[in-house]
Structures are given as structure tokens and as C-alpha cells.
Image (cartoon, rainbow, N blue to C red):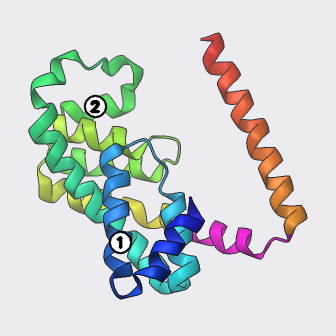
Amino acid sequence: MNDTILWFFDEYSSVSVFISLFISILISIVGIVPSFFITAANITFFGIWYGLLFSFLGEALGAIVSFILYRKGFKRFSQNIDSTKFPQVAKLLKVDGMEAFQLILALRLFPFVPSGTITIFAALGKVSLPLFTLASTVGKIPALIIEAYSVVQINEFDWEGKLLLTLISLYLLITVLKKIRKQ
């Protein structure tokens, strides 16, 4: 996927920033696709600092657009959501103000909570758009820095390192899938 994105960036270099932002927004709306691919493409094509900046802007804009769409589109379905699957995130349905800000910020900093889940629950709750925007944007900074650092390190691997990383990733994926299947 990274090669395809890089091809688009190269082929349409005059609008590559807008392509990057558009892809980031789409990833946020879908909510289950990891943003790692666009971050990797941004850093590879634009360099570390501009790549990080465009990834940050794309994720921030994506969260805002997703919040607005989820709030408008899912409000009527909110009664059907099983909030027991995500007890920490479900608190977002009931809180507002500083408590909501702190919860969104904390959840964004926690790497195992899907970004889309946080956005959906915040949109269905009482959180205002400005408060969500600030907390979500600030919370994304550490995750993006770690993601960018990882991309730079992986790009420096030789083929043996990339093979080892792929095998470890496959092992972790299989382990997680087995645990999910048992439940």
C-alpha cells in the first residue's frame, strides 16, 4: 500500500499534500485502517519533519471530520451500541467539560484503543467539537512521534531486519487472532 501512495505522491506531486490529507481523513472516517501507512509514505516522500507535519494535520483533520460525520449520522443508532465492550471509552457517553478533555487525551495516549472507537463514543456523547478537537489533537502528538520514529528506523533496516520484523508481526497477529477466537 505504501508503494501505491508514494506513486500517487510522485505522479501528482503538485497536489501531494492534499492527497495525503485526503487519505488521512478517509482513514479516520473508516476508523479501522491503521494510519501507519500514510505516515510512512509521508515521511518517505516529504522527509521526517514535513512528513510528520502532514501526518499530524491529516490525523487532526480526520478526527474532526469523523467526529462531525459520526455525530450527525450515528446519533440515532447510539442506543444500539454495546458499550460494555469498551468500558473506558464508554465513559465518553456521559462526561463533558474538563473531565471529557482529560479522558479523550488519556485515551489518545493509550496505544491499544482504536482511534475510531474514541471518536465514535465522543461524537455520541456530550463532548463539544472544540473540546474534542483540542484533546484529540494534543493526544495524537506523542503517538505520531513514536510512529514517525518507527518508520525512520524501519526504513533503515536491511532486508534481514525487515524479514525479522515481518515474522514477529505475523507471530503477534496469529497469537492475537487465536485469543480472539477462544473468546
Q: Is residue 138 shown to the viewer in this render? A: no
Farthest-out residue, top: 182
Magenta: main secondary structure equals helix
Mark 2: secondary structure:
helix
Residue at image location 40% in from the left, 81% down from the top = 12
Query: Which image quarter holds the N terminus?
Result: bottom right
Residue at image location 59% in from the left, 11% down from the top = 183
Q: Is residue 101 shown to the viewer in this render? A: yes
Marks 2 and 1, how far apart in space? 35 Å
Q: What is the tally of numbered marks visible in this picture?
A: 2
Q: Name the residue under label 1.
A: 19
Q: In this view, does 149 lie to the left or right of 32?
A: right
Q: What stretch is highlighted in magenta?
A: 148-158
Image quarter of residue 22: bottom left
Q: Nearer the viewer, residue 115 or 132?
A: 115
Q: In this view, does 94 lie to the left or right of 148?
A: left
Provide residue 111's location: percent of width, then percent of height.
Answer: 52, 48
Provide residue 57's location: percent of width, then percent of height.
Answer: 33, 72
Q: Name the residue under label 2.
A: 91
Provide residue 179's location: percent of width, then percent of height.
Answer: 67, 20
Q: In this view, does 133 lie to the left or right of 176?
A: left
Identity, as a three-letter code, of the amino acid under mark 2: Lys
